[in-house]
Image (spheres, rainbow, N blue to C red):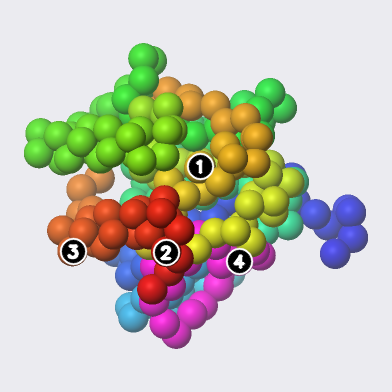
Amino acid sequence: MTTASIPPLSLIIPAYNEENRISLFFDSIARFDGELIVVCDGTDRTAEIVEGIASRRTDLTIRCLRFDHRLGKGGGVIAGLKEAKAPLLGYVDADGSTSMREMLRLFSSLPHADGAIGSRWVDGSTLTVKQGFLRQIESRGFNILIRLLFGLSFHDTQCGAKVFTKNAVDTVLPRMISRGFEFDVELLWQLRIAGFMIEEVPIEWQNKGDSRVQKRDMLRMLAGLFRIRFGRGPE
């Protein structure tokens, strides 16, 4: 790839069985000066829908990565990050909880840091549609556990809106072992160990419901976090 063809930004959208929401995601994008990499590893028509949108939305650069097996949340993000060409890259959930305007605001933080993560739990954040009370309790409890296990000071490691320099990601990606929902925590932990500076940025966020994180996923996430922290490696 020539220098002239390298996009300024790469944004990865993990899209496991998102056929009911992926069109709305792209409808919300008026403009994006970079590449949008959609990782499709489900069993529904998400990939076909994305490819159809790509053929119509010639104003956007859309790449669709197809996989015939489940990669996991982290695995999907990793697959996209490995394909990303831009010097600045990130990932966002396909549910539209974070707008493209907010993602671009996160990208604007990178001249001053190696990464910027959206946070729903710091001063200045706006939750236009909040999570249910039980989900909020679970989120706060999870954050306390992360602080105890990994010493991370972030208030919100799980918000699906994160951006980084390619240099930072390329440095730590070979060390990553997680492929599930615990991926975000390990990524931030590895970046901290490597000495990169990550900013936590208040974000405008709207709960879209229909969370892909189920109770069994939470148990797997907890088990994965202990494996990461205490060096047992992936199963």
Neighbours of disc 1 within 10 Å: few (<14), some (14-19), many (20+): many
At numbered mark 2, what does the secondary structure look like: helix, strand or loop?
loop
Which residue: 43% across, 33% down? Answer: 152
Q: Name the residue under label 3.
A: 216
The type of residue carrying mark 4 is Arg
Q: Does the magenta stretch include residue 66?
A: yes
Neighbours of disc 3 within 10 Å: few (<14), some (14-19), many (20+): few
Q: Quadrant of the N terminus?
A: bottom right
Q: Does the magenta stretch include residue 25?
A: no
Q: Mark 2 points at which residue?
A: 232
At numbered mark 4, what does the secondary structure look like: helix, strand or loop?
strand
At numbered mark 3, what does the secondary structure look like: helix, strand or loop?
helix
Q: Earlier in the sequence, mark 3 or mark 2?
A: 3
Distance from disc 3 to disc 1, alpha carbons, whole Å, reads 23 Å
Q: Name the residue under label 1.
A: 188
Whether residue 37 is visible? no
Neighbours of disc 4 within 10 Å: few (<14), some (14-19), many (20+): some
Which residue: 73% across, 57% down? Answer: 85
Measured as percent of width and height from the top left, residue 25 is found at 41, 52
Which residue: 69% across, 51% down? Answer: 171
Distance from disc 3 to disc 2, alpha carbons, whole Å, reads 21 Å
- The furthest residue to the top: 123
Distance from disc 2 to disc 1, alpha carbons, whole Å, reads 19 Å
Q: Name the residue under label 4.
A: 63
Measured as percent of width and height from the top left, residue 130 is found at 20, 32
Distance from disc 3 to disc 4, alpha carbons, whole Å, reads 31 Å
Q: In which quarter of the image is the C terminus?
A: bottom left
The type of residue carrying mark 1 is Leu
Please identify, in this view, whether the residue under mark 3 or under mark 2 is nearer the observer.
Answer: 2
